[in-house]
Image: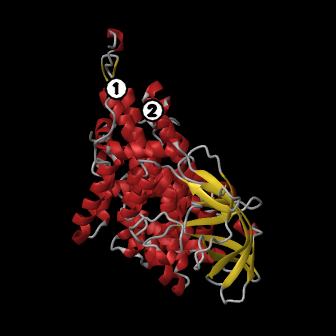
Amino acid sequence: MAGSTHTVTNQPPPLVGYDAFTADRALTEAVDRHTAPDLLDEVRGELAALGRACGSVQVQEWGARANENPPTLRTHDRYGRRVDEVDFHPAWHRLLGKGVSAGLTAAWSRPGGHVRRAAAFLVWTQVDAGNLCPLSMTHAAVPALRTDPALAAEWEPRLTSVIYDPELRPARLKPGALFGMGMTEKQGGSDVRAGTTSARPLAEDGTYGLTGHKWFCSAPMSDGFLVLAQAPEGLTCFLVPRVLEDGSRNVFMIQRLKDKMGNRSNASAEVEFDGTWARRVGEEGRGVRTIIEMVAATRLDCVLGSAGLMRQAVAQAVHHCTYREAFGGRLVDKPLMRNVLADLALESEAATTLALRLAAAYDDGGEQERALLRIAVPAAKYWVTKRCSSVTVEASECLGGNGYVEESGMPRLVRESPLNSIWEGAGNVQALDVLRALQREPLALNAYLQEVGTARGADHRLDAAIKDLLTELADLEGVEGRARRVTERLALVLQGSLLVRYATPEVADAFCASRLGGDSGAAFGTLPHTLDLASVVERARPES
């Protein structure tokens, strides 16, 4: 029996038993906005079901167990034969199976598929981000495979399936399949053209033997992989199946798994090829062009993943401060804490609103929307993923010492937060890609300016920010040194225009004042005190 000094008081209940989708007002409103009316009931129903699962005690426990029990590598069996298999905790398989069944690889085959998948991806990230990697890779592989109609006809039904089958066997025998990717090498990193993996043509047309290594291979337990290698005509994309048609294992030697700071439940590997059988995807020498749409899809997933991490961090902070009392009242009612929470909530809502707008552009598919994506996706990837780390660290501080303890879940969010900024090209790569779009693709800039221009006249600070941005863009001489500044402004102005159009007046006012009008400090919690911050915080509060 506990002594009187061990009676627990003034502690919040766990944030469980809630619907992580329905409780997210910014997300639900974005789904309503970007979903066709005849699909809305169906989409909201499936997302609410996933949201309830995400907020359940059981699924939250799966996420914790998967994170605490990272995958392990078995290179050989007991007799010395190479098997190169990765073993995962059962909780990982449950999470991945749930993600597949929720349609996180099925966007390309469903009406309104990108918006409904984007919302689901954002929600499911909040359980454990590690299982999102194979879901993202599988989703992103589809546009690359579509450059070869025969390959797409064979593989796309497997990749867009809602059935998870973890067994290693020929893909033709499986009801669903997952894809990984191997692009970067030790000497090149983001400079994929510096790769040295070679591709030697075989007797059968379109088939090759690959020899070389990959420094980062994502999801090495997958059924197939998209890989870049140097063919006779230059850098080319290839499909490497894990198991060959006759049931034998392809040469796919996993040398080790990366010991990562975060993303612990997911496997990232170094792999070697030695005459590994592969099929060409697209034309020889056109590898980068073949994977360009795949790259864009993974970049958007980085935005969505960061938005999901921010949403969970803010939800935990607001929840804690709603119940925790100090200095004679609830923390959430203290003006200074309210300022911090509101500032965090602004960042989360701006990220969510922008991410869903980009997903809607994918569903639209028109020339104008494709042009907008060309500049908006790398800009969003640059800015949103960078803000994620600051948000998760500040949100953890709202919990005090409890936020520094593993049981709170906040350290896992903090460790995960830098990943999306690094993945698929770190910040400089994104900023330079924005510059290429500005300099070479006038349709992209026109689409961007038309998008933000629809909000002109609604807020004087947004109008001034658009004017300043146009001045910045008018002088592209020596712009590389200003690439981050330009990209940041592009992202912030786009976020501001979306919030002015779609968010509540309190959110739009606070965002424009602080992010566009310059009326804030460098740290969170420095918003103007004249704003309606209580409404901003209340909007971010999760139901529990």
Check disc 1 and report its element: helix, strand or loop: helix
Task: Decide which of 190, 88 is in the foreground and name it.
Answer: 88
Task: Decide which of 82, 332 is in the foreground and name it.
Answer: 82
Q: Position of residue 51 (x, y in %)?
A: 31, 52
473 vs 236, left or right, is left
Q: Position of residue 87 (x, y in %)?
A: 56, 54
Could you tell me which quadrant the C terminus lies in? top left
Q: CA distance from mark 1 to mark 2?
A: 21 Å
**Residue at the spot 63% in from the left edge and 68% down from the top edge:** 436
- Return the residue at label 2: 407
Q: Position of residue 112 (x, y in %)?
A: 34, 71
> Looking at the picture, does residue 24 appear above or below residue 192?
above
Dot 2, crowdedness within 10 Å: few (<14), some or many (≥20)?
few
Could you tell me which quadrant the N terminus lies in? top left
Q: Which mark is residue 331?
A: 1
State the scheme by which the image is colored: secondary structure
Please identify the quarter of the rendering in which residue 435 is found. bottom right
